[in-house]
Image: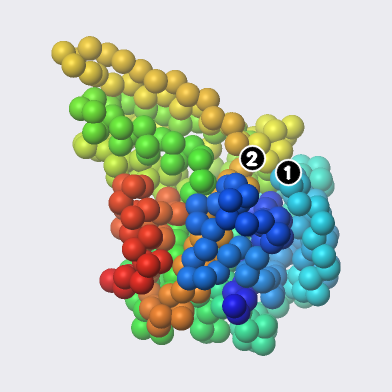
């Protein structure tokens, strides 16, 4: 079986968990593979994914081998596979653009980004690296609010002719103009804004769908999240949160029988707690009415390690992209986007999306 060659933008906690997972499952069999939604997709297992290029802007990562960079500060996710061999892949200097919020400079070095003095690689050089490394799929792990940077790398993927997975809440795959560009070139894209396997959004959606199916009228709801990784630190700048808030809110609104007014739904990041590190805590409340207009409510507290939680979804998205490349399918991959992303081109309930993915894996055309 050939390898799936991936390039990664942003060697942070999410990239660390993904790469650890590729090696963690290498010696496993399907019965031992706890934490995977699919063991094999198109004949590809997790260990068939190979990182061939990487980009970052932090001085502690640029110039290092990826195997070292994934454990460098400010990364703080749980290490569940420390035995990562030297990969022979140097982290290259990317483009900063709007990828670093100014307020990050007000925090201690161990918790924030330190921009490297290395010369930034321009679009021509990045496209050249993608082509020379024979990248199949480019993964975007930029910080929330990186609008210009995400569009820059999406264009690099187009120019290099590689598939693009947009794990961040900048609307590329769900934007008709960008989607048309990728479809015209026959390049598959998955996005936008990665879900977790069992995270705040998927749990909130599941409960909202349960209310609808059981005839309970949802009157109001909130989802409050805290965490201590660079993502939560970055999101203290509320001006960077417009697309993130829209993405998370729409993921829940889309499964309701009747959309809630803005004042009755609040979903979004709430605060940065340094000592939580990559642990994310969600506080969720839902208020509604049951039979006879009798009121009821649910309160839930969810605690998860944020980055491994998302890696379980990305590892499926990568393999579906590779299958699409082999089948000559370009443009939006609606099934895997709906299953793994908060703001896909088209929203489906999660059980329907799962069925669509299984049909796609089995050979049914995407559209």
Q: Is residue 133 above or below residue 25?
A: below
Residue at 58% in and 51% down: 31
- Taking the image as drawn, is residue 154 in sight? no
Judging depth in this view, the residue of 176 and 114 nearest the camera is 176
Percent position of residue 52, x then y = 69, 75
Task: Give the quarter of the figure containing the C terminus.
Answer: bottom left
Q: Residue 126 sits in which quadrant?
A: bottom right
Mark 2 or mark 1, which is nearer the start of the sequence? 1
Q: Residue at x 44, y 20 (%)?
A: 299
Asked if the residues shown at circle 1 and circle 2 are in contact, with their CB atoms under 8 angstroms apart, the answer is yes
Residue 366: % across, % down: 32, 70
> Which residue shows up at 51% across the image and 60% down it?
316
Identify the mark at residue 78; answer none if there is no mark: 1
Q: Secondary structure at mark 1?
A: loop
> At x 82% / y 56%, what residue is drawn?
83
Kindly report the distance in space between the C-alpha atoms of the residues bearing marks 1 and 2. Answer: 7 Å
Q: Please tell me the numbered disc located at residue 140.
A: none
Q: How many marks?
A: 2
- Give the vertical position of 219 relative to 323 (above or below): above
Front-most of residues 16 and 109: 16
**Residue 287: percent from the left, percent from the top?**
33, 21
Q: Which residue is mark 2?
A: 305
Which corner quadrant of the image does residue 39 belong to? bottom right
């Amino acid at each position: 079986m050939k390898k799936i060659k991936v390039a990664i933008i942003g060697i942070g906690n999410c990239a660390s968990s993904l790469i650890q997972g590729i090696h963690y499952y290498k010696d496993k069999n399907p019965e031992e593979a706890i934490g995977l939604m699919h063991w094999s997709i198109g004949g590809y297992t997790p260990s068939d994914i190979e990182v061939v290029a990487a980009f970052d802007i932090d001085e502690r990562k640029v110039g290092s081998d990826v195997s070292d960079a994934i454990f460098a500060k400010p990364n703080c996710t749980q290490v569940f596979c420390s035995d990562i061999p030297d990969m022979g892949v140097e982290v290259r200097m990317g483009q900063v653009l709007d990828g670093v919020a100014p307020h990050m400079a007000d925090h201690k070095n161990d918790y924030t980004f330190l921009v490297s003095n290395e010369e930034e690689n321009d679009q021509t050089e990045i496209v050249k690296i993608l082509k020379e490394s024979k990248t199949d799929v480019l993964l975007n792990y930029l910080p929330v609010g990186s609008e210009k940077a995400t569009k820059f790398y999406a264009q690099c993927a187009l120019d290099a002719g590689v598939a693009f997975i947009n794990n961040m809440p900048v609307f590329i795959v769900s934007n008709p103009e960008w989607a048309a560009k990728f479809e015209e070139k026959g390049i598959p894209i998955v996005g936008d804004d990665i879900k977790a396997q069992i995270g705040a959004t998927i749990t909130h959606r599941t409960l909202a769908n349960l209310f609808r199916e059981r005839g309970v009228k949802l009157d109001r709801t909130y989802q409050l999240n805290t965490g201590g990784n660079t993502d939560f630190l970055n999101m203290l700048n509320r001006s960077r949160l417009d697309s993130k808030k829209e993405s998370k809110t729409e993921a829940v609104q889309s499964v309701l029988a009747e959309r809630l007014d803005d004042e009755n739904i609040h979903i979004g990041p709430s605060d940065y707690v340094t000592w939580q590190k990559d642990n994310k805590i969600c506080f969720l409340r839902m208020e509604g009415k049951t039979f006879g207009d009798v009121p009821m409510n649910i309160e839930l507290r969810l605690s998860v390690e944020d980055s491994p939680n998302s890696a379980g979804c990305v590892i499926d998205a990568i393999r579906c992209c590779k299958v699409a490349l082999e089948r000559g399918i370009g443009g939006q991959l609606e099934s895997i986007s709906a299953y793994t992303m908060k703001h896909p081109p088209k929203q489906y309930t999660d059980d329907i999306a799962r069925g669509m993915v299984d049909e796609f894996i089995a050979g049914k055309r995407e559209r």
